[in-house]
Image (cartoon, rainbow, N blue to C red):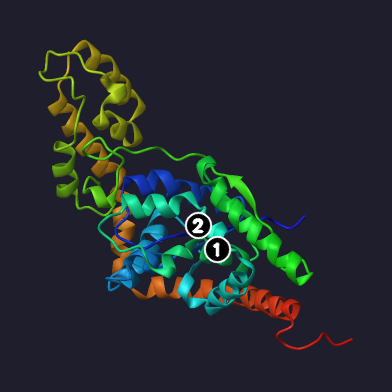
Amino acid sequence: MPQHRILTGYRPTGKLHLGHWFGNLQNMLRLQNEYDAFYFVADWHALTSEWQDSSHIYDFGRDMVADWLAAGLDPERCTIYRQSDLPQVIELMLYMNMVLPMSWLERVPSYKEQQVNISNKDLSNVGFFLYPALMAADIAIARSDLVPVGEDQEPHLELTREIVRRFNTTFGADVLVEPKALIAKEGARVPGLDGRKMSKSYGNSIFITDPPEVMRQKAMACMTDPARKRKDDPGNPAICPLHQIHKLVGKAADIAEWEACCPAATCGCVAHKQQLADDLITYFADFQARRAELDAQPDRVDEVLEAGKEKVMPIARETIADCRAAIGLDGPAVG
C-alpha cells in the first residue's frame, strides 16, 4: 500500500518561539519518519495579513527553514518547499473559486474572529477572505491524502473536503484527492512570560534563537504564581507560568523537587528562575550550534528549497493538467 502523504505549511511572520518548538516542530520531526511528509513555507498565506508591510516575509521564510533544519528536519526524509515557487497553486485556487459559494467562506469562524481580534492590521482585503480557498489549493495541488490537524482545526479541513467534493462533482471526475484529518499529537501549550499564551504579538515570547544572555534575562522576568507574594508563601506549580515552561526543558528529577518545595514554601522563585535560565540555555545549545553552522552556509537553505521545488513541481503540474482536462480548457479529450 502506498505511503500516505501529509502536508502542512507555516506562515513566515517572525522568529520561532518555544510555542512553535513544542507545539509544531516536535510533531513535524516525528511525522517525517512515519509519512511522505511535505512541509512548505506559506509565504502567500503570510501576505494575506502582512500585505501592508511584506518586506520581511522572504527573510522570515529562509530563517524558518534554517530553524527547521537545525531542529532536525531532514530533506532526505521530507520535502521542504516555498509556496510561492508553485504558480500552480494559484491556478488551482482560481478553478476552485469557480465552484466555491461565497457563503461557504463567510461562515468560516476564524474569518470574523480574526478581524475582531487583530485590530492592528487591515484584514478587509479579498486575499484574507480567500484564505480558506488558498489552503484548499495548497492541499489539493500536492495530492496529499492526510493533513495533520488538532481536534479544534477539523472544521477548517472539512471546508477543503467540501470544495474538493464540489469540484469533482461539478466536472464529473475524481481529479482531486479528498484529504482526511490526521489528528496530530497535541503539542505542549506554552505560556508566555506574562502568563498568557506565548505569542509574538503579545511580546511575551522566548525565541529559540535568542542568545543565552537574552534567554536568561527573559527567564528572570518570567511571571510566577501570582498568589505567591513572599518567599514563605506556599506556591502552586500548576498555575505558575515559570514552572510550566521549566517542565518542558528541565530534568524530571529537578522538576519533581520544585513541585515538592514550592507548595511547602521551602524554595524561592528567584532560584527557580535562575535554574530555568540555565536549563533553557542548555536545552537549546545544540540547536543553536547547528543554526550557527547554517548561518555560515546560507546557500544550504536555498539548496533545500530548490530540491523541494523540484520534487513537488511534477506533482503540481500533473494535478493542473488533470484539472484542465476535466474542465475542458484544453479541448475535448481525444480517443
Q: Residue furthest toward the right?
A: 335
The reply to whether residue 277 is in sight is yes
Residue 125 picture quarter: bottom left
Q: CA distance from mark 1 to mark 2?
A: 6 Å
Q: Residues within 10 Å of mark 1 (few under 14, many from 20)?
A: few
On-image quarter of the C terminus: bottom right
Residue 167 picture quarter: bottom right
Q: Residue at x 29, y 33 (%)?
A: 246
The reply to whether residue 311 is in sight is no
Q: Residue furthest toward the left?
A: 230
State left or right for residue 189 relative to residue 332: left
Viewer-nearest residue: 335 or 304: 335
Q: Which mark is residue 102?
A: 1
Q: Residue at x 32, y 45 (%)?
A: 18
Q: Which mark is residue 106?
A: 2
State left or right for residue 192 relative to residue 81: left
Confirm or deny contact between disc 1 and disc 2 (CB under 8 A): yes
Q: Residue furthest toward the front?
A: 103
Q: Position of residue 123 (x, y in %)?
A: 35, 62
Kindly identify the amino acid type of the residue bearing the numbered disc 1.
Answer: Met
Looking at the image, residue 141 lies above or below residue 231: below
